[in-house]
Image (spheres, grey):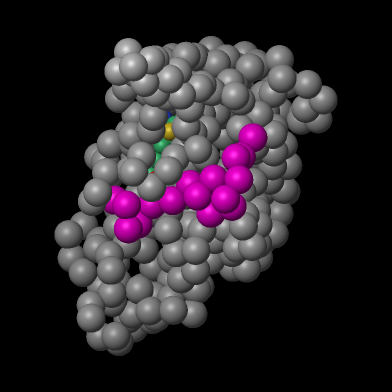
Amino acid sequence: MTNNKFKIENRESQIENQITDLLDPDKIKANLKTKRIGGKILVYDSTSSTNDIAAEYAKNKQNDGMVIFAEEQIAGRGRVGNKWLSGRGDSILCSIVLIENKLNAELLSLTCAVVVAETIGRTGGSRAKIKWPNDIMLNGKKVAGILLESKVDKGCNACIIGIGINCHQKKDSFSVQIQPAATSLDMESNSVSDRILLAKRLLTSIDQWLETAEKNGDKVIDRWRELSIQLSHRVTLLFNGTSFTGHCIGIDPEEGLIIQLDTGGVRMFNAAHTIVAKPPA
Ligand code: BTN
């Protein structure tokens, strides 16, 4: 009896742990109508960080637009030295190689945020929004993050766009500390998201928005303004360790977030050196 119960429970947990939307390069590539992104797609079952793998491929100019996915990362990283944790098969974990990227760091960062927010789109009745610089939020909780890293190797100037989107996580997939602030597509929609479909949407969107950004950065800014949760709101930022509070009045494609400071004056904050803090109570 006890044995049978164990077998049933064990089988149930195996079924539960089965990944039904395994990332498959051929499925992602099927009917993918992109010009620059996704000509080469690799999927790792497990790796340290897709950004590390992408950085190796970025040494060869022919790998512009290449995309690395992984089912699991054992040393996934986020911004400002944070770890990026995800159970195997739970997320979209990917890195895109851009060689000789023409966009400045701020505009590229804004473009990527627009891409990921649009890819997630409307989920469970709510629209994905951008929390500057690189957090994508659903119902006030973080559902995705972006980590941009640049690499210079023997005169070859590359940029790696690392994207993590929470898909199949349940509440207790997240640590107790981050549970109040994190969510997944499945949690918000009460259904099971399809990572293949999502991957296709992501690559199509980045292909189109990069082209748009190179031709006309204002279009990115306009879309960013529609998707921002901070624009016209109060924010507190930590810049090089100093705290600044004020009203967010805009975004500059070269200098970053524009804040009307409580202490007077207007100041711009770039994504690389700024952390968004909770506003004081
Ligand atoms: C953040 O919100 O702090 C950024 C998170 C970025 C996570 C992705 S997952 C794929 C890629 N590989 C990494 O190690 N990090 C990025």
Q: Position of residue 34 (x, y in %)?
A: 76, 30
Q: Which residues are magenta?
A: 178-194
Reply above or below: 209 against 94.
below
Q: Residue at x 54, y 45 (%)?
A: 186
Q: Nearer the viewer, residue 73 or 40?
A: 73
On screen, residue 37 versus residue 13, left or right, reads right
Residue, far left: 241
Residue 41: x and y in percent read: 62, 17
| Residue shown at 42% from the left, 43% from the top | 170
Q: Is residue 104 something one can see in this rendering?
A: no
Q: Position of residue 99 (x, y in %)?
A: 56, 26
**Ligand 1 image-quadrant field:** top left
Say which of 258 and 12 sits in front.
12
Residue 76 sits in quarter: top left
In the rendered image, the vertical position of residue 276 relative to residue 271, given as above or below: below
Q: Magenta span has 1?
A: no
**Which residue is found at the position 59% from the left and 68% from the top?**
225
Q: Quadrant of the C terminus?
A: bottom left
